[in-house]
Amino acid sequence: MKKVLIINGHPDRESFCFGLHESYKKGGLQSGNEIKEIILSDMTFNPVLMHGYRKRTELEPDLLEAWDKIKWAEHIVWIYPTWWASPPALLKGFIERVFLPGFAFEYQEKSPFPKKLLTGKTSEIISTMDAPVFYYKWIVKDIGGKMIRRDIGAFCGIKNKRTTYLATIKTSTPEQRKGWLEKAEKLGSKL
């Protein structure tokens, strides 16, 4: 049994990402995992890191609750659409407000490398997009995926286990979407 946290970064509850979320959750629960969720579209917080790291902005109650869930989790699942080659602004704002020094990493005196405070956790990404996956990976160079896996996750000690891109959403058929929902359920059951 694993402690799994699903972070849904889509700002629209009627999106296909929510179907993927529910399917993944179903598979995870059927396998005996404990599931908690962070649904960004339901949260109230300012996504702008107003003062950078110069001065701490107090965290809203929803972000304090998110901290507790991230601390609790052994495995974090990022579900979001890829827009303009990266996650939505809402998800980026959430990351900037929550993955802070003293929580996710800690600067070290006389070292350019931080202490990774989230070591021992794993993650995976499930992202939808309208560009073909080969184009996103090889021409666009997987900008958003690298940001989540390396520039945020690995920087803080989280090891990414799997990345799943589903495309193209805009031109997908009902049969393709059904298959993707089944795939998400299987991914949730394989932890």
Image (spheres, rainbow, N blue to C red):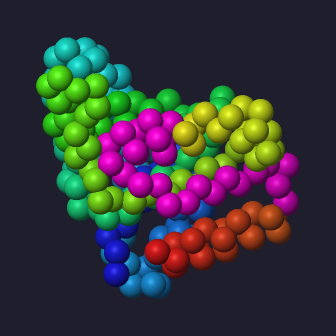
Q: Is residue 159 magenta?
A: yes
Residue 37 appears at what percent x and percent y? 37, 59
Which residue is nearer to you in this view: 67 or 106?
Answer: 106
Q: Residue at x 65, y 38 (%)?
A: 142
Number of numbered discs on residues: 0
39 relative to 107, above or below: below
**Quarter of the view holding residue 98:** top left
Q: Residue at x 32, y 43 (%)?
A: 156
Q: Residue at x 23, y 20 (%)?
A: 53
**Quarter of the view holding residue 34:** bottom left
Residue 55 visible within the image = yes
Judge from the rendering whether residue 136 lies leftward or rightward of residue 8; answer left or right.
right
Q: Is residue 39 magenta?
A: no
Judge from the rendering whether residue 99 lies leftward or rightward of residue 14; answer left or right.
left
Farthest residue toward the front? 110
21 relative to 11, above or below: below
Which residue is nearer to you in this view: 30 or 40?
Answer: 30
Q: Please give the range of residues in magenta.
A: 147-173
Residue 30 appears at what percent x and percent y? 47, 85
**Quarter of the view holding residue 120:** bottom left
Judge from the rendering whether residue 129 lies leftward or rightward of residue 150; answer left or right.
right
Residue 5 visible within the image = no
Residue 78 appears at what percent x and percent y? 48, 52
